[in-house]
Image (cartoon, grey):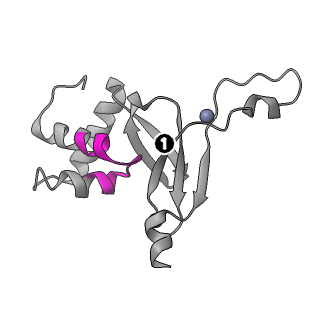
Amino acid sequence: MAVHPTRQRKAIHQAMMLAPGPLSPNDILSLATQEVPKLGIATVYRTINLLLEAGDIQAVPINANDVRYEPCDRGHHHHFLCRVCNTVYDIKGCAGQIAKMLPADFEMDEHEILIHGTCAECKAVD
Ligand SMILES: [Zn+2]
Ligand SMILES: [Zn+2]
């Protein structure tokens, strides 16, 4: 953690470290509140901005109204969005071959993959 670790910041960072995928500010609030009961959403947003500036976490845009956050040290991976519980899970590995989909003479710098579907937990209660 590149920022001065206060109790609140540690709890917020820890919530993102332990999650199975990127978290929304509200997810972070409800998880970090278990450690720091008086935490408020304004502090969560402030801390997210500090951690972003410090390069500890990065934004994962899911759609125009839904940006989630994850630690920067997870390496190349992709995401799965459950349409039922709205959880985003990290997916290890990569489809590969993506650069081959490009027209001739196009060059890929990076790519993102967001798979939509139903997670195992939600499928079980269907
Ligand atoms: Zn689900
Ligand atoms: Zn990939």
> Is 107 rendered above or below residue 125?
above
> Is 89 rendered above or below residue 105?
below
What residue sits 14% from the left and 42% below the top? 8
Front-most of 24 and 20? 20
Q: Position of residue 64 (x, y in %)?
A: 55, 52
Q: Residue furthest bottom?
A: 126
**Callout 1: 10 Å neighbours few (<14), some, many (20+)?**
some
Q: Position of residue 22 (x, y in %)?
A: 41, 46
**In which quadrant is the N terminus drawn?**
top left
Q: Is residue 18 left or right of residue 60?
A: left
* Residue on which the image places disc 1: 60
Q: Position of residue 94 (x, y in %)?
A: 61, 36
Q: Give yes or no for residue 21 being in the magenta stretch.
A: yes
Q: Is residue 39 left or right of residue 115?
A: left
Q: Give yes or no for residue 76 being in the magenta stretch.
A: no
What residue sits 81% from the left and 34% below the top? 101
Please identify the quarter of the rendering in which residue 96 is found: top right
Q: Is residue 9 left or right of residue 20?
A: left
Q: Amino acid at mark 1?
A: Val
Q: Secondary structure at mark 1?
A: strand
Q: Position of residue 102 (x, y in %)?
A: 82, 31
Q: Which residues are magenta?
A: 14-28
Front-most of 5 and 82? 82
Please identify the quarter of the rendering in which residue 17 is found: top left
